[in-house]
Structure formats: structure tokens, C-alpha cells
Amino acid sequence: MKTRNLTFSLLLIIIIALSSCVMHKASYAQAYSSSDTRGGTLYANDESFGGMYETKNERKVMFNAYLTLTVKCPDTANVYIEQIAKKYNGYVNQIGTYSSTIRVESDKLNDALKEIEALGRVDRKSISGQDVTDEYLDYEIRLENAQKARERYLELLEKAENVEAALKVEKELERLNETIDLLTGKMNRIDHLVQYSTITISLNEKKKPGVLGYVGMGLYYSVKWLFVRN
């Protein structure tokens, strides 16, 4: 009995040591030839962006767009922004009087941006893409290792000859299950943010001139008419 327990304990120690080792796959040597990479982030303008989403080698890229608009009425603009999100199979992440965030399907990003820009005057605009392929592959490898380790522990659990040995295995199984759930959640989030691009819109309300402002504008256009004619 002591010999069996010793053998079981040695097997348990070996499996624990193996399951704690994490393999890392080498990162891709080549990124997009048409993109500008700075600090792991891909930047695109309107013309090149549409082609950038056609990822090579199934790379994982999360796209984010930022807009600053001047509009007559922010509340009205938000109503249209929400409709645009639904139109392009997306959803509203946050709606605020002066700042809103929506997500749309990544292959519809340019179309959604054009409709949002039509709501007012564009003061600022930027689009960026973050390549998270290596991070995703790392999670994938760690998940595979954890799942294999769990299978080995389940086999050990069936061979456990006493309560103490079974409790040790169950403790490791609990730890592995938590790791598997955590890694699966991180991978699912990356998949989601690759499928749906994020658009953040800052809204500025267009200022209306007062009575004196309208008088000043009238004088300005009158003087301009005296000196400049088509």
C-alpha cells in the first residue's frame, strides 16, 4: 500500500511540474506590408483602411475609431448614432450627452463612419488597429496545455486509492478549471473585439449667437458685400 501511495504521489508531482510549464509560440516575423506599425498598433487612413481589414494569415486585429463632431443638438445626434449602430449589426456600448461609444461589424466600419460624419462638422478623426495575434496564440497554447493537464488529472483521480490522494488531485483540477475559464474568457473577448470595431464619438454643441452676435454677423456680411463681389 505504501509503495502504491508513493508511486501515486510521484506521478502527481510530475504532472504538476509539467502543467506549470507554459509554451510560447514565436511571433510572426512579418506584419502588414501596407500598414504603418508603431508600438504594436496599426494605423490606417480612409483609403487604406478598407483593405487593411482583409487580414493576412488570419491575424487578429482590433480596430478603433475616434470622432469629434460639432452638431446642432447632441441628443438628436445620439438618436441617429444609436440607429447607425443597429443598422450595421452592432450595438450601443455607451450613450452620453457629449460622448458615446458604439460597436459595429468590422467590415462595415467605413460605412458607419461616413453616416456618423454626416451628422455634423468633423473636427477630429482617427482610426487605429491593434494587432493581438501573438497574444491570442499565447492564450491558445496555454489553454491547450491546461486542458491536457486536466485530462491527466482526471485519469489520476480514477486511480486515487484514498481520500487524501483524491483531495490533492481535485485541488489541482479546481485550479486548472479556473485557468481554463479565464483563458477562454480572454480569447472570447478578443474574438468579439475583432469582429466588432469600436467607435467613440465626442459631441460638441454648435454655439448659437445672441442678439448682438446676429448684429455683428449682419455688419460683417454688409461690409464684405461692399468690398468683395463675385
Image (tube, helix red, strand yellow):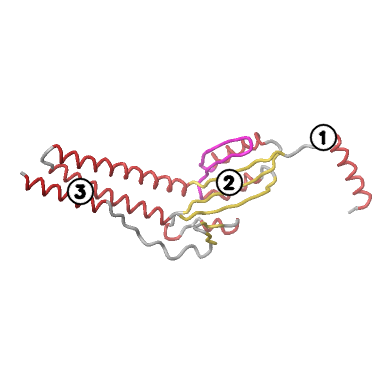
Q: Position of residue 212 (x, y in %)?
A: 86, 36
Q: Residue at left 16%, top 39%?
A: 166
Q: Nearer the viewer, mark 2 or mark 1?
A: 1
Q: Quadrant of the N terminus?
A: top left
Q: CA distance from mark 3 to mark 2?
A: 49 Å
Q: Position of residue 60 (x, y in %)?
A: 44, 54
For the record, the magenta segment spans: 88-106
First-in-chain label (3 vs 2): 2
Q: Callout 2: few (<14), some (14-19), or many (20+) C-alpha neighbours within 10 Å?
A: many
Q: Secondary structure at mark 2?
A: helix
Q: Which residue is mark 1?
A: 210
Q: Which residue is mark 2?
A: 112
Q: Position of residue 47 (x, y in %)?
A: 60, 58
Q: Which residue is mark 3?
A: 152
Q: CA distance from mark 1 to mark 3?
A: 77 Å
Q: Are marks 1 and 3 in contact (CB under 8 Å)?
A: no
In the rendered structure, does residue 69 fall within the stretch colored magenta? no
Vertical comparison of 35 with 205: above or below: below
Type of amino acid under label 1: Gly
Q: Callout 1: few (<14), some (14-19), or many (20+) C-alpha neighbours within 10 Å?
A: few
